[in-house]
Image (cartoon, coloured by chain):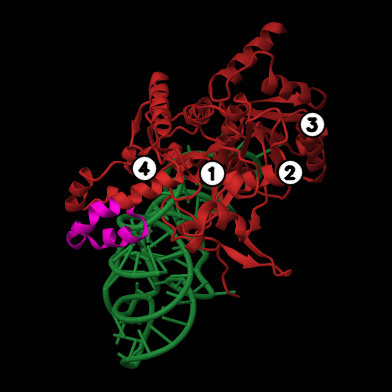
Chain colours: A red, B green
Amino acid sequence: MKNISAPKGTHDLIKDEARGFEHIIGIARLVSSLYGFDPLETPLFENATLFERSVGDATDIVQKEMYVFKDKGKRTLALRPEGTASIARSVITNKLYATNDLPLRFYYDGTMYRYERPQLGRYREFRQFGIESIGLTSIFHDLEVMLLAIHILQALGFEGINTKINSLGDSSARERYKTALKAYYEPHLPTMCADCQMRYEKNPLRMLDCKVPHDASLALKAPHISEHLSKEDKDDLNFIFDALNGFGINTTIDTTLVRGLDYYSGIIFEFSYIPASGKDYGAIGGGGRYDKLVSELGGPDLVGAGFAFGIERLYHILNEEKKLESAVFPDDVYIITKGDEARNDGFSLLTSLRTHEVRGVMAFEDKSFKSLFKIAESRGAKYAIIIGQEEVDGEFVTFRDLSARTQEKVEYGKILPHVLKLVHGEHHHHHDDDECCCGNCNDEEKEEK
RNA sequence: GUGGCCGUGGUGAAGCGGUUAACACAUCUGGCUGUGAACCAGACACUCGGGGGUUCAAUUCCCCUCGGUCACCCCA
């Protein structure tokens, strides 16, 4: 039998990692709802033309990274490479814009697919959390979107995020700028690196952040995109810059910042953060304004703005920075039994504990007490409940405090309240507070008696 | 898509032409007949990622392939 493996560029999220992802998404959803955003879930695949028309059929994402396939009905479908196009599509197909309450504010999260060569922080199936605000009427709406993004990062524990902003202007400004750039670079082209010669044809904006010293020095004197921006675009950019700094967010205008999706126009932004380990996971999130996306997809003339975070990247960084508290949920109780009768009694007890929101498991197979205690320990269980023949005969339970290493006998009839009191006790303890629970609880119990 | 490095048991890893393929952790069994530490004694590798080749002999060399990782590219 041949071994099977997970497809290249995919990864399983196991226990801690899955909980870490849940945590990140949970915070992002919570903060988004603070800003009046609602969830919107769209399909994992769409008609391929949706992405060709929105992301852009000349972009790398569509040209070489999209998973495209035909279904049995000969429809040409694509696994979504990003989330914005689907949200825009949904707004149009469901006529969500027919409301007096614009902009529409939505958040989403889910897997995205891009056929790329996997690397650290880059996968073929990866997860994003994003928000879209569609039907903007004010620059404050752009600002709101950015503040929400930053708020989420702060709520996750990020400090010192590098925020870069830029304005791409409208599409005609961008074309004018590309022409100007090419005119500037043309005479120098023979002296430049091979990559830049390729960029010249494909994406001249990228020539600006070449790392080859010679080329980088040329970039310093290159024409500026601001020379081609309308007054309104310039004012918007300055407004955002001042506002973010005014809120204490360290922001820089990076005129070389560009994005790989064609629908962006006007203000764009990107967040990055390199952890102390020095590992560079790339941009952790980014987004911007899209003036024409909705109308080009056949909807009304609505302006939108949004962003997306890469959850894998957020997770990896938070993990390196030890910002994720252990996501492990230790058992409250671990039940150890010996013999059929004991197993029956133990199972009834376990079942009733669970209905009372006590977390626990028991082993149903016969193993040595030694290994069962080892399992209880590795699960981080607070208490062990032992039921063997002695206990069954005497109708009691041996209740062991695993951290204090003390145990006592508790009658069958009193075990449920006994556990509930310890686990849920009126006086609320923090779960990470090792010493408190057992000691205090027992003391108080004695005092009450 | 281009180039570099890597792939040994559940895990971390030695070995780099002929070895019983170390060692450590984990797991299991016993010493302790119902109790988690430590200690002691044992046990556990049906493909050394997969396929092919060179060789008397390959985990060790070569090729292909799959996967990971790094740089480029691109982006979350």
Q: Position of residue A43 (x, y in %)?
A: 67, 51
Residue where numbered disc 1 is placed: A17
Q: What amino acid is labelled 2 in the image?
A: Asn
Q: Which residue is mark 3?
A: A355
Q: Secondary structure at mark 4?
A: loop
Q: Amino acid at mark 3?
A: Thr
Residue A293 percent coordinates (x, y): 56, 46
Chain containing mark 2: A
Where is mark 2, residue-wise? A94
Q: Nearer the viewer, residue A61 or A388?
A: A61
Question: Label 4 is placed on what type of residue?
Answer: Leu
Extent of the magenta region: A181-204
| Position of residue A322 measured from the top left corner of the image (x, y, whole percent) | 43, 34
Whole-angstrom CA distance, mark 3 to mark 1, is: 27 Å
Q: Is residue A308 highlighted in magenta?
A: no
Quarter location, residue A189? bottom left
Task: Say which of marks 2 and 3 sits in front.
Answer: 2
Labels 2 & 3 near each other (Cβ < 8 A): no
Q: Earlier in the sequence, mark 1 or mark 4?
A: 1
**Label 1, label 4: how far apart the Cα atoms are:** 32 Å
Find the distance from the CA under tag 4 to the CA under tag 2.
34 Å
Q: Identify the residue shown where x is 48% and y is 50%.
A: A262
Q: Residue at x 28, y 48 (%)?
A: A208
**Looking at the magenta stretch, what is its main secondary structure?**
helix
Q: Nearer the viewer, residue A279 or A169?
A: A169
Name the quadrant of the N terminus of chain A: bottom right
Question: Which residue is label 4 attached to?
Answer: A257
How far separated are the C-alphas under marks 1 and 2?
36 Å
Residue at mark 4 shares a chain with residue at mark 2: yes
